[in-house]
Image (cartoon, grey):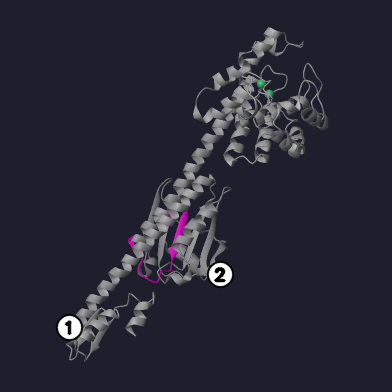
Amino acid sequence: MCRTIKADERFMLIPVVMITSLTSKDDRINSIEAGAEDFISKPFDKTEVLARIKMLLKVRELNVSLARAYGDINKLTTFGKMAVKSFESGQFNLGFAIDKIIEQIMPGKDSGSDHPRMCVVGAPRGHGGWEWTRFEHEPAGIKRLNLDMNLESHLRLPPDNKARIVSYDAENLATSKMKNLVKQLRLSSLSVDNLLCYLSTSLCIFTMNYSREITKHDADVLNTLVMHTLFVKSTLENIQEIEGGFTYSLQALARASETNDEDTGNHILRVGTYAKILATELKQSEAFCRDIKVHALTHDVGKLHVPLNILIKPEQLNKAEFSFMKKHTHYGAMILGDHPRLRMAKTIALTHHENWDGTGYPNGLAGNAIPLAGHITKLADQYDALRNARVYKPAFDHATSVQILTEGDGRTLPEHFSPTLLAAFVSVASRFDETFNSLNDNLYTEVQQPA
Ligand SMILES: [Fe+2]
Ligand SMILES: [Fe+2]
């Protein structure tokens, strides 16, 4: 019987004392091997037995605390890993993060009676008021229910950016600061036996109905889980803001470079979008596709250094003028400089006029010596130039532009592009047309017009 008790995870921490008339050394060894904590031979002394039981219960209590502490460490480690994952994805969803916190605090029903049986979570809605959710266990998992209650009016929250953690047991619940909140919940037939609260102006979490005393560890675990979550949230928001600023600055630089160009504003945005479409079709990494859309914007930033009489000359450029025009690639690379975050932008500025057959400029690179980002941007740029009127040509429709790129017109030749790039272009060409039409009507669609 002792072996059976000790083999079951649910009962193994229950102390067993053998009280027996057996006295031999073998019997003692047998009972220890079966897992018994103590062995008392008859006749026994009642006081001694009670003292030993007391001692064993104390040991049991410590063992339970130890097991709980291990569980808590596990919880925090798992949660930390999850936080890192959500960090990598760059996305943050508060609802999803709260679900994860609750999963840690209130794991499956089989995991013993150590956990709260109900949680209530509230967060302010964007448009005023708070949204309250109740979490409870169901055989299929955690049930999430909307609580249509105005619980926030019964709370005294700490000042902004501060949080408070408090716990109440059954005795002091009725007289506590939470008594009105508890009353509200009870009015909705939700029983509250004991309560641990995380209170802040941005998030409130109540975990309740523990079948044991709420400890300082419970408060620490809840606090750590929430702090992890809010840290990831604010850091991701900061990163997104910095990223937004970075993209905006590149757009501003690109737009400045187009001041004297024939078309302004949306040409650069369209080139970025085409480039991303091509990169995706060529199965480039997510980061590459995301980056090229932004880094292609500044492909012609070097034109800032080209004199206006060359830039807007209606007649064909003479040899000297054209060789100056070619320098916009080097100037572009120079302006963008050596910052690692602008490496792709620099590469594109330098190589977006190289031809696959080696006839391009500035370095006459051929084949795979041309960086892919530059080569993709070249095609994107040329498609858009074909769709728009230039001093030397009218605007072509989509079909004609595709034909010129794939079959050549004397000026543009298919040999200028890698066969793989051209094939990718043909299969996504219709999306180029859609992009041209949707990013054509309104100049500066992504940026507000100056008043
Ligand atoms: Fe260019
Ligand atoms: Fe361009």
Quadrant of the rendered structure where residue 348 is? top right
Q: Position of residue 413 (x, y in %)?
A: 76, 25
Amino acid at dot 1: Glu
Residue 117 to residue 409: above or below: below
- Count of picture labels: 2
In the picture, which quadrant includes the C terminus? top right
Amino acid at dot 2: Ala
Is residue 12 magenta-colored?
no
Is residue 205 magenta-colored?
yes
Residue 162 to residue 243: above or below: below
Residue wearing tag 2 = 140
Q: Using residue 261 as the reference point, say whether residue 68 is left or right of it.
A: left
Q: Using residue 91 as the reference point, say whether residue 230 is left or right of it.
A: left
Q: Mark yes or no: residue 109 visible.
A: yes
Residue wearing tag 1 = 48
User: Disc 2 or 1, which lies upstream in sequence?
Assistant: 1
Kindly identify the residue that appears in the image at 38 percent across and 63 percent down. Answer: 71
